[in-house]
Amino acid sequence: VQTKRLKEVERLQALQTHFMDALKTHLPGVVVNGSRKFRLPNNVHVTIPGTDNERLMMQLDECGIQCAVGSACSASNDEPSHVLKALGLTDEAAQSSLRFTMGRATTKADMDYTVKTLVRSTKA
Protein backbone atom coordinates (compact mmCIF):
# COMPACT_ATOMS: atom_id res chain seq x y z
CA VAL A 1 0.00 0.00 0.00
CA GLN A 2 2.79 2.44 0.91
CA THR A 3 4.62 1.69 -2.34
CA LYS A 4 1.46 2.38 -4.38
CA ARG A 5 0.92 5.66 -2.55
CA LEU A 6 4.49 6.81 -3.16
CA LYS A 7 4.27 5.90 -6.86
CA GLU A 8 1.02 7.87 -7.14
CA VAL A 9 2.59 10.89 -5.43
CA GLU A 10 5.49 10.76 -7.90
CA ARG A 11 3.07 10.47 -10.84
CA LEU A 12 1.00 13.41 -9.61
CA GLN A 13 4.12 15.52 -9.02
CA ALA A 14 5.26 14.83 -12.59
CA LEU A 15 1.81 15.82 -13.92
CA GLN A 16 1.79 18.91 -11.75
CA THR A 17 5.22 20.01 -12.99
CA HIS A 18 4.23 19.32 -16.59
CA PHE A 19 1.03 21.34 -16.17
CA MET A 20 2.77 24.31 -14.52
CA ASP A 21 5.52 24.36 -17.16
CA ALA A 22 3.01 24.10 -20.02
CA LEU A 23 0.94 26.92 -18.56
CA LYS A 24 4.03 29.14 -18.29
CA THR A 25 4.99 28.31 -21.87
CA HIS A 26 1.58 28.85 -23.48
CA LEU A 27 0.20 31.55 -21.16
CA PRO A 28 3.27 33.66 -20.35
CA GLY A 29 1.40 35.98 -17.96
CA VAL A 30 0.14 33.15 -15.75
CA VAL A 31 1.25 33.15 -12.11
CA VAL A 32 1.47 29.86 -10.23
CA ASN A 33 0.36 30.62 -6.67
CA GLY A 34 2.28 29.11 -3.79
CA SER A 35 5.62 27.42 -3.66
CA ARG A 36 6.62 25.15 -6.52
CA LYS A 37 8.60 23.04 -4.07
CA PHE A 38 6.42 22.91 -0.95
CA ARG A 39 2.95 21.97 -2.14
CA LEU A 40 0.55 19.07 -2.30
CA PRO A 41 1.20 16.98 -5.39
CA ASN A 42 -2.39 16.99 -6.62
CA ASN A 43 -3.25 20.64 -7.17
CA VAL A 44 -2.24 23.74 -9.06
CA HIS A 45 -3.59 27.18 -8.26
CA VAL A 46 -2.96 29.90 -10.84
CA THR A 47 -3.76 33.52 -11.52
CA ILE A 48 -4.35 34.52 -15.12
CA PRO A 49 -4.23 38.32 -14.93
CA GLY A 50 -7.00 40.21 -16.66
CA THR A 51 -9.42 37.28 -16.76
CA ASP A 52 -12.70 36.63 -15.00
CA ASN A 53 -12.36 33.33 -13.16
CA GLU A 54 -16.12 32.67 -13.09
CA ARG A 55 -16.36 33.07 -16.88
CA LEU A 56 -13.29 30.89 -17.43
CA MET A 57 -14.62 28.23 -15.07
CA MET A 58 -17.89 28.07 -17.02
CA GLN A 59 -16.08 27.92 -20.38
CA LEU A 60 -13.85 25.14 -19.13
CA ASP A 61 -16.85 23.26 -17.72
CA GLU A 62 -18.50 23.41 -21.16
CA CYS A 63 -15.38 21.69 -22.50
CA GLY A 64 -15.50 18.96 -19.86
CA ILE A 65 -12.83 20.46 -17.58
CA GLN A 66 -13.60 20.90 -13.92
CA CYS A 67 -11.84 23.53 -11.85
CA ALA A 68 -12.72 25.85 -9.00
CA VAL A 69 -12.35 29.52 -8.18
CA GLY A 70 -10.73 30.64 -4.96
CA SER A 71 -9.08 28.28 -2.52
CA ALA A 72 -10.46 25.02 -1.16
CA CYS A 73 -11.17 26.53 2.25
CA SER A 74 -13.36 29.28 0.81
CA ALA A 75 -15.07 27.43 -2.03
CA SER A 76 -18.57 28.36 -0.85
CA ASN A 77 -17.81 32.02 -0.20
CA ASP A 78 -18.12 34.82 -2.78
CA GLU A 79 -15.45 36.94 -1.08
CA PRO A 80 -11.81 36.61 -2.16
CA SER A 81 -10.16 33.87 -0.13
CA HIS A 82 -8.29 34.87 3.02
CA VAL A 83 -5.70 32.24 2.03
CA LEU A 84 -5.11 33.92 -1.33
CA LYS A 85 -4.89 37.29 0.39
CA ALA A 86 -2.34 35.83 2.83
CA LEU A 87 -0.31 34.75 -0.20
CA GLY A 88 -0.28 38.39 -1.24
CA LEU A 89 -2.95 38.33 -3.96
CA THR A 90 -5.06 41.42 -4.43
CA ASP A 91 -8.84 41.06 -4.71
CA GLU A 92 -8.47 41.54 -8.47
CA ALA A 93 -5.84 38.80 -8.75
CA ALA A 94 -7.93 36.46 -6.61
CA GLN A 95 -10.84 36.99 -9.01
CA SER A 96 -8.57 35.97 -11.88
CA SER A 97 -7.50 32.73 -10.20
CA LEU A 98 -8.40 29.08 -10.76
CA ARG A 99 -7.68 25.90 -8.81
CA PHE A 100 -7.11 22.61 -10.61
CA THR A 101 -7.02 19.30 -8.77
CA MET A 102 -5.66 16.06 -10.19
CA GLY A 103 -6.48 12.50 -9.20
CA ARG A 104 -5.80 8.87 -10.07
CA ALA A 105 -7.61 9.13 -13.39
CA THR A 106 -5.86 12.34 -14.51
CA THR A 107 -3.49 11.93 -17.46
CA LYS A 108 -0.89 14.05 -19.20
CA ALA A 109 -3.30 14.29 -22.15
CA ASP A 110 -5.90 15.75 -19.77
CA MET A 111 -3.45 18.42 -18.65
CA ASP A 112 -2.45 19.23 -22.24
CA TYR A 113 -6.13 19.55 -23.20
CA THR A 114 -6.68 21.85 -20.23
CA VAL A 115 -3.78 24.10 -21.27
CA LYS A 116 -4.98 24.21 -24.88
CA THR A 117 -8.52 25.04 -23.76
CA LEU A 118 -7.32 27.73 -21.35
CA VAL A 119 -5.26 29.36 -24.08
CA ARG A 120 -8.26 29.37 -26.42
CA SER A 121 -10.60 30.64 -23.67
CA THR A 122 -8.34 33.50 -22.60
CA LYS A 123 -8.05 34.74 -26.17
CA ALA A 124 -11.82 34.70 -26.76
Image: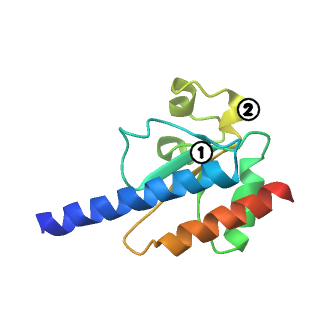
Is residue 115 depicted above or below 43 in this figure? Answer: below
Q: Nearer the viewer, mark 1 or mark 2?
A: 1
* CA distance separating discs 1 and 2: 13 Å
What secondary structure is marked by label 1? strand
Q: Label 2 crowding class (10 Å Cα cut-off): few <14, some 14-19, many 20+?
A: some
Q: Mark 2 = which residue?
A: 92
The residue located at (44%, 61%) in the rendering is 15
x, y (%) of residue 72? Answer: 48, 47
x, y (%) of residue 95? Answer: 70, 40
Is residue 73 depicted above or below 115 in this figure? Answer: above
**Amino acid type, label 2:** Glu
**Amino acid type, label 1:** Val
Q: Mark 1 = which residue?
A: 46
x, y (%) of residue 61? Answer: 68, 68
Mark closer to the chain start, 1 or 2: 1
Residue placed furthest toward the front: 25
The residue located at (46%, 73%) in the rendering is 107
* Apparent side of residue 14 relative to residue 32 in the rendered image (left or right): left
Question: Picture quarter containing residue 62?
Answer: bottom right
* Apparent side of residue 72 relative to residue 4 in the rendered image (left or right): right
